[in-house]
Amino acid sequence: MNLRCLIARLDFLSGRTRLALYPPFRLMRIKVLEIASRGARCAYDPEHERAIREEITEKGRSTPVFEYGCFLSDGVLCTLGRNTVATRPKDYKNST
């Protein structure tokens, strides 16, 4: 068991304290002031899926970008993320 897993299992510590003890945060001396309740949302557009399938058919690959957001309990966006995914068919062979 590594240190990160050990810290995650320490139920007697608050979420704030466990996050502050997270090894990368500890090394960067990040001080956790508050943990707000939030939820993640991702909008899925069927047109986006169609465009991905079309690009895979035409080029044999697609590299779409997806956006997602984390929202506070009052609905305010606190984090916006963009994820780029290399979508390849199972039998895809890199040209290099």
Image: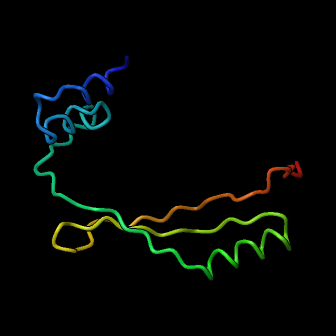
Which quadrant does the N terminus fall into? top left
Q: Position of residue 19 (x, y in %)?
A: 21, 39
Q: How many marks?
A: 0
- Say if 48 sits above or below 63 in the image: below
Which one is nearer the viewer's eye here, 11 or 30? 11
Residue 60: which quarter of the image?
bottom right
Hey, which residue is sitting farthest front in the picture?
Answer: 46
Q: Position of residue 85 (x, y in %)?
A: 62, 59
Residue 65: which quarter of the image?
bottom right
What residue is shown at x 32% (from left), y 35% (from top)? 24
Which one is nearer the viewer's eye here, 30 or 92? 92
Hey, which residue is sitting farthest bottom in the picture?
Answer: 47
Q: Position of residue 90 (x, y in %)?
A: 80, 50
What residue is shown at x 79% (from left), y 56% (from top)? 89
Classify residue 3 as left or right of residue 75: right
What residue is shown at x 58% (from left), y 62% (from top)? 84
Specify how the rendered protein is coloured: rainbow
Classify residue 18 as left or right of residue 1: left
Hey, which residue is sitting farthest top in the picture?
Answer: 1
Classify residue 65 as left or right of residue 51: left
What residue is shown at x 55% (from left), y 79% (from top)? 45
Q: Position of residue 54 (x, y in %)?
A: 78, 76
